[in-house]
Structure formats: structure tokens, C-alpha cells
Image (tube, grey):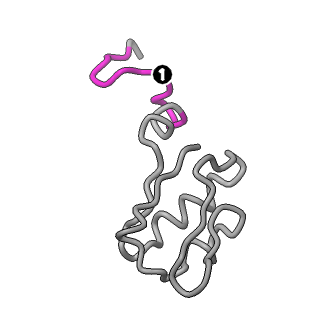
Amino acid sequence: MRLVVDLNRCQGYAQCAFLAPDVFAMHGDEGLLYDPQAQDAHRERVAQAVAACPVQAILVDELDMAATAPGGAGRAAGEASDG
């Protein structure tokens, strides 16, 4: 899973580091360190961290999320299903 954190937007609230400590870590009071190629085993905790970020600074690569979305794996936008 690919992550991008807008470090200009990040305010150092550390919710991500609290919820997904294997992926995010605070360096000092405001510096954030993170693994941009987080393992799929951390997907649930990363999703919680993304939702908890007060300034919405964490993004998960949309293509990565679409490939793993239930019922939408590999389907192009607008493609009809035969049921």
C-alpha cells in the first residue's frame, strides 16, 4: 500500500502515530516519519489513522485502494456487470 503525507499540512497531532505505530512515528514535537510503502498487514490501522487525521494530511494511493476494494477489483469505472 502506498502512502503520501502532506508534510506541509501535517500539524503534528500524532493521531496517526498513536493508531498505526508500525507505519507512523513522531520525530520531536512536530516532525513525522512514515513508511510510504506500508505493508498490507497494517491496512486496517492505516485506514483508522487516515480517518483520525484532523487536517486530512494522509492519503492512500487511490489506484491501490481501487484494486483492493470489495466488488470493484480490476473493474474499470463505468463498466457494467452482467450480474
Residue at x-position 60% and y-position 62%: 34
Res 21 → quadrant: bottom right
- Residue 56 placement (x, y as % from top left): 37, 67
Left or right of 26: which side holds 51?
Answer: left
Left or right of 76: which side holds 38?
Answer: right
The amino acid type of the residue labelled 1 equals Gly
Residue at x-position 60% and y-position 84%: 28
* Residue stretch rendered in magenta on the structure: 68-81
Residue that lies at the very extreme toward the left in this rendered image:
78
Tell me the crowding category of disc 1: few under 14, some 14 to 19, or many 20 or more residues within 10 angstroms, Cα based: few
The residue wearing badge 1 is 74
- Residue 59 placement (x, y as % from top left): 43, 54
Q: Tell me if residue 73 is in the magenta stretch.
A: yes
Q: Is residue 67 above or below residue 25?
A: above
- Residue 24 placement (x, y as % from top left): 62, 67
Q: For this rendering, which residue is in front, 38 or 76?
A: 38
Q: Is residue 80 above or below residue 36?
A: above
Image quarter hosting the C terminus: top left
By secondary structure, the bulk of the magenta-drawn segment is best described as: loop
Q: Is residue 73 above or below residue 25?
A: above
Left or right of 4: which side holds 1?
Answer: right
Secondary structure under the numbered disc 1 in the rendered image: loop
Residue that lies at the very extreme toward the bottom in this rendered image:
29
Image quarter hosting the N terminus: top right
Q: Tell me if residue 78 is in the magenta stretch.
A: yes
Residue at x-position 40% and y-position 65%: 57
Residue at x-position 55% and y-position 72%: 32
- Residue 53 placement (x, y as % from top left): 44, 72
